[in-house]
Image: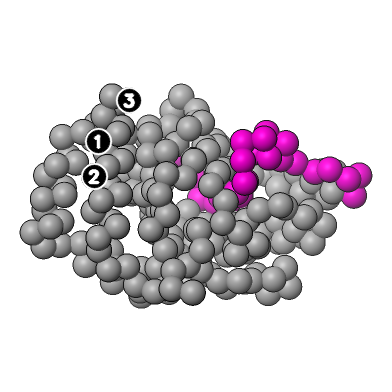
C-alpha cells in the first residue's frame, strides 16, 4: 500500500504496539469567511507534491475546542521513521512552495507547529474521519504510559488510539497526549467504557494517573487525506 493509512502507517496488534510513530502538526487560525480559500490552497498544493511512501498527510478542520485553543485547521504529517519525516519537512522549498506561502499567508491570522512521538498505538489500520486529542501535564511519564498500557488490555476501542509524548511546540507544561478516532459524530459522542469490566479498568486508570493534570481536548474532522 503506497500511503500510510490515516494518521499512521503500521499495523500493530495489542501485543506489539511499541513501534514509535513520529508526527508533525501545523495548526493555523483563519477567519470563517476565508476557510474555503485556505482549503483550496492547501489541498491543491499538497495533492501535487511527492510524498514519501512512509509518510502520510491529512488536513482537517478543528471543530470542537476550548476557548484557549487557537486554531481552526490542522495539517498533520506522520511516519514510523523520524529520518523520513524530517527529510520531507526539510524539502519544503522552491518556487512552487514560495508561491503557495505567498498566497496562503494573507489568510492566516496565526500559526504554530507541534511535534511528538506516539509510543503505544492500537488499531492503526483504521481510517476514520474524526479524531480527538486529550492533553496532559505529567510528572511521571513512565507511570502514565504503564497505566495506559494496562487500560488497553481491557478496553476495546472501536477506532485508532495512541498515547505518546508532546516533544516540541507546546506550552503550559503539556507533555503527554492520548489520541483516538471515530467513524462518525455519533460514535464520538458515545465514546467511553461499555461493560462493567471496562468501567473498572477506566476507574483504575484514573486512579493511577491521579497525579497528572488534565489540560485540554480538541476534536478535528478530516477534510483531505493525501
Give the mark nearer the N terminus: 2 vs 3.
Answer: 3
Q: Which residue is mark 2?
A: 41
- Answer whether labels 2 and 3 touch (C-beta < 8 Å): no
**Residues drawn in magenta:** 172-197
- Answer whether labels 1 and 2 touch (C-beta < 8 Å): yes
Q: Is residue 137 visible?
A: no
Give the mark nearer the N terminus: 3 vs 1.
Answer: 3
Q: Is residue 148 visible?
A: yes
List x then y, in percent, for residue 21.
50, 66
Q: Secondary structure at mark 3?
A: helix
List x then y, in percent, for residue 60.
42, 44
Q: Which residue is mark 3?
A: 32
Q: Residues within 10 Å of mark 3 (few under 14, many from 20)?
A: few
Q: Residues within 10 Å of mark 1 (few under 14, many from 20)?
A: few
In the rendered view, would you say 209 is above or below 91? above
For the residues labelled 3 and 1, the Cα–Cα distance comes to 10 Å
The magenta stretch spans residue 193? yes
User: Which residue is located at x 46 percent, y 24 percent?
Assistant: 67
List x then y, in percent, for residue 103.
14, 42
User: Which residue is located at x 65 percent, y 62 percent?
Assistant: 123
User: Which residue is located at x 28 percent, y 24 percent?
Assistant: 33
User: Which residue is located at x 70 percent, y 47 percent?
Assistant: 209
Amino acid at each position: 500500500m503506497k500511503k500510510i493509512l490515516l494518521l499512521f502507517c503500521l499495523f500493530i496488534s495489542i501485543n506489539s504496539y511499541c513501534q514509535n510513530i513520529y508526527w508533525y502538526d501545523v495548526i493555523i487560525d483563519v477567519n470563517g469567511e476565508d476557510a474555503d480559500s485556505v482549503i483550496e490552497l492547501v489541498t491543491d498544493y499538497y495533492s501535487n507534491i511527492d510524498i514519501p511512501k512512509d509518510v502520510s498527510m491529512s488536513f482537517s478542520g478543528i471543530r470542537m475546542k476550548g476557548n484557549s485553543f487557537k486554531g481552526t485547521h490542522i495539517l498533520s504529517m506522520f511516519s514510523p521513521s523520524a529520518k523520513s519525516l524530517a527529510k520531507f519537512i526539510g524539502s519544503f522549498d522552491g518556487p512552487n512552495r514560495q508561491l503557495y506561502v505567498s498566497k496562503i499567508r494573507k489568510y492566516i491570522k496565526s500559526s504554530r507547529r507541534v511535534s511528538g512521538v506516539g509510543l503505544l498505538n492500537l488499531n492503526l489500520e483504521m481510517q476514520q474521519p474524526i479524531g480527538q486529542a486529550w492533553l496532559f501535564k505529567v510528572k511521571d511519564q513512565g507511570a502514565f504510559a504503564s497505566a495506559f498500557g494496562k487500560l488497553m488490555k481491557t478496553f476495546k476501542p472501536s477506532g485508532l488510539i495512541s498515547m505518546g509524548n508532546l516533544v516540541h511546540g507546546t506550552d503550559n507544561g503539556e507533555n503527554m497526549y492520548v489520541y483516538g478516532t471515530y467513524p462518525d459524530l455519533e460514535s464520538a459522542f458515545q465514546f467511553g467504557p461499555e461493560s462493567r469490566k471496562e468501567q473498572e479498568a477506566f476507574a483504575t486508570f484514573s486512579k493511577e494517573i491521579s497525579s497528572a493534570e488534565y489540560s485540554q481536548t480538541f476534536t478535528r474532522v478530516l477534510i483531505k487525506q493525501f
